[in-house]
Image: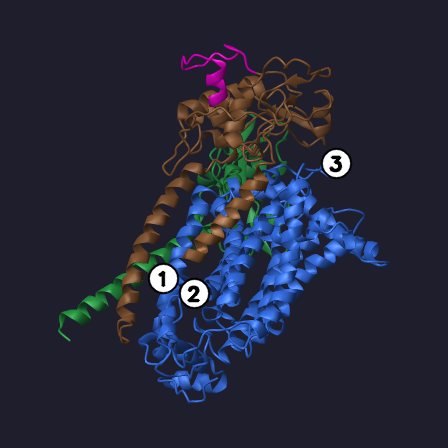
Chain colours: A green, B brown, C blue
Amino acid sequence: MSDKKPKRREFLFTASYAVGAVGVGAVVWPLVDQMNPDASVKALASTEVDVSTVKPGNTITVLWRGKPVFIRRRTQEEISEAKSVKMEDLKHPEKDEDRAKDPEWLVMLGVCTHLGCVPLNDKGDYDGWFCPCHGSHYDTSGRIRKGPAPLNMEIPKYEFVNANIIKIG
Amino acid sequence: MKNLIKLLSIITLICFTTAQSNSAETAKFLKTDWSFKGVFGKFDRGSLQRGYQVYTEVCSSCHSMKYLSYRNLGEKGGPEFSEAEVKAIAASFEVADGPNADGEMFVRSGKLSDKFVKPYENIKAAEAANGGAYPPDMSVLVKARGGGVDYIYSLLQGYEEAPGGMTLDEGVHYNKYMYGNKIKMASPLSEGIVEYGDGTKATVEQMSKDVTTFLMWAAEPHLESRHQMGFKAIIYLIILTILVYLSMKKIWSRIEPEV
Amino acid sequence: MSDHEYTPTSKVGKWFNDRLPLLTLANHLTDYPTPKNLNYWWTFGGILTFCLIAQIVTGLTLAMHYTAHADMAFESVEHIMRDVNYGWLIRYIHSNGASMFFLAVYIHIFRSLFYGSYKSPREIIWIIGMIIYFLMMATAFMGYVLPWGQMSFWGATVITNLFSAIPFIGEGIVSWLWGGFAVDNPTLIRFYALHYLLPFLILGLVVLHIWALHVPGNNNPIGIDIKKPSKDTVPFHPYIVIKDGFALLMFMIVFSFFVFYSPNILGHADNYIEANPMVTPSHIVPEWYLLPFYAILRSVPDKLFGVIAMFAAIFVLVILPWLDTSKIRSAVFRPLYKQFYWILLADVIILGYMGAMPAEGLYLLVARVATAYYFLHFLLILPVLGFKEKTLPVPLSITESVLGGSPNLATAKNKESFDK
């Protein structure tokens, strides 16, 4: 048996395996991808909310992408309280202006960043929210002040479509 | 091999003989070229957009298309209206929503994510408004009829005077291609009933072709992906088959060659 | 099962194998001596295993999106077809996969009928195979109900109503099956549960089927007993693995043409109409693979005897090893049996065609003749043939049959069985 024969035979088998592997990958991908969010779920990626009836000092909760979103119309007191907090005092330093573009409106995901419970409004030691699951306290800007949560409550993408309607997502 | 041929001829003979007793009740369908048929078949975008216009202006007053969403009109493989156009189309419809904070249902303008608005609340309302006959939903209508696109294309052009001697009840019309020849829908298309935005002349034949093309897409929105993926898959399989065949010959050559 | 001891090469392998001998099993499967003269009709067992796994995998991924409720089933299938990523592909693979599964199983069964693979000592393999076939039909029937189209609903109604033919307890059994007074939501949900379950029973039976096969080893085209291993055998890997692989790829090309270019051609248009209990379709027809049994059922004018005839058609296959009295296995050496085999195949295809036609006039007459002949073949022709037939001499070994070393040179050319 010459040298050429084994090389040609090996190449054929290697080529077959390689081409076969491509096919296996092509088959596996749709089976995996079908579990990703489907088109109808992705179409509901944004929600519009009418906030015209929300009075200062009140909070409404709306459903967005299956999760609660807190929309709070803050009073002047709450706004100045939020702005006066020193960055060194914060576990997750964030300026209030960076969280609420229009200081009167706070729009954030009502999900505790510890293990995902929904914090309670107007509770806790910092005039904001309190999570009953493991005792996290959030301030009037939704920032973590005390307790096990590592991060401030998340601010989603949102914008005022007009004076009364906020589009989230 | 000889036996296989004998077998096939016996079967063909028997099936052919018995099939003779099955008389065709309806005429053969009208033929036209469908751009989406064949291995490389694709939809004609212009035809789809015109077809959508025919559906909306003529058919949708009675026929729902409840499995389609407005966003589908902008997705790849379909009429491919621009995002602005699709938003405008959706917004032109009123959609029921609710309950609101007061617990009441309300009406708002349509969004991309909404399903096509239905002309009737439910099937009974549809029947009541149409002399007892339910105008079928059109989402998969093309697949729900044995003749497919040829049948629908023909039926839309198949209205004629009933042949002598046939009496038709009130509200029943004669159609050359309808199974049983009697149909409760009056001829929906007439020349110029729709004014096409792209200037195409709206003959009955043109509208029939366009709306049928639209219905084919509505029933199979992923047809183009399916054809493209099929071509790639079969070419791939042929290549792999050749490689495996050669590998098989190589391996089997190791044992003494057979007679 | 071979008795030579296999020792794994690695230490970890040996440790594991001493506790659960999976590596010994793998070694047995790769070395398994297979007759070297197997033709392509023998590749369908491997193809069937692929089909079962494909159906389970696509079925599982469909189950993640399907809703088993009468008000939402049809819509959930449309949701899969339109919105789920690659949903249309997975659905079409599953629906056409069922047809491909039955195509393969019919070829597999007809291979066994031709070469006498059901004969001693392989009776249990055959019976397990028949049980698998029966479970396949039950699974496919229930699966077809799930989209809740007109054919789903009315097919379910007609077939479940058959049980009312049973004297005294029939009506009770039917309402027990339905979970109500008609096919409705409870029926759909339980069919879904059972449709999910049965394939795993089939999987277990397939393991037993292969295990039972490995005791005597494969049959072969000339139907003689062979020593394993010997000059007449090759190790399963790589010889049979690569051949089965090649055959599977050819099968997948055919499969792909259906999935990508004619995904609805084997189905019925009426199943794209949502189920309506008030309107019966003009012709209720099951899927093509159930048509022969449907034809037999409708051939008998009496309801109860029609049901009995339909089940008898399967039962007659189950007891086949005892109906066929011939001592010779392969039809290659049974020229008269071979003729009757082809007639049986034609008969079954004719039955299938008649099952798709209305049960009246000439169609009904042909169906009745074909039904009668079907039972005649198994209950009269086969037993008599075993005694009366003059068979051809059988070679003593495969190598002998190939190289023509025996005095029976004429038989050596019978390697390609269909060339007579």
Q: Which residue is mark 2?
A: C43
Instruction: Identify the residue shown where x is 69% and y is 52%.
Output: C297
- Subunit of label 3: C
Q: Between residue A25 and residue A95, name the one nearer to us.
A: A25
Callout 2: few (<14), some (14-19), or many (20+) C-alpha neighbours within 10 Å? Answer: many
The reply to the same-chain question for discs 2 and 1 is yes
Dominant SS type (magenta):
loop
Whether tag 2 and tag 1 are in contact, CB under 8 A, the answer is yes
| C286 relative to B57, above or below | below
Q: Which mark is residue A116?
A: none
* Labels 3 and 2 positioned on one and the same chain: yes
Q: Secondary structure at mark 2?
A: helix
Residue C409 placement: quadrant = bottom left
Nearest to the eye among marks 1 and 3: give it: 1
Residue at image location 40% in from the left, 64% down from the top: C40
Amino acid beneath label 1: Phe
The residue stretch that appears in magenta: B189-209
* Depth check, front residue: C134 or C362: C362
Judge left or right: residue B241 versus residue A9.
right
Q: In terms of secondary structure, where does tag 1 sit?
A: helix
Question: Mark 3 is on which residue type?
Answer: Met
- Give the residue at mark 3: C278
Q: How many marks?
A: 3
Question: On the image, numbered disc 1 is attached to which residue?
Answer: C246
Q: Quadrant of the C terminus of chain C?
A: bottom left
Instruction: Using the rendered view, name the quadrant where residue B40 is placed.
Output: top left
Give the foreground label among 3 and 2. 2
Left or right: B98 in relation to C225:
right
**Residue C72 in sight here:** no
Residue C97 position within the rendered picture, expressed as x and y whole percent measured from the top left: 50, 53
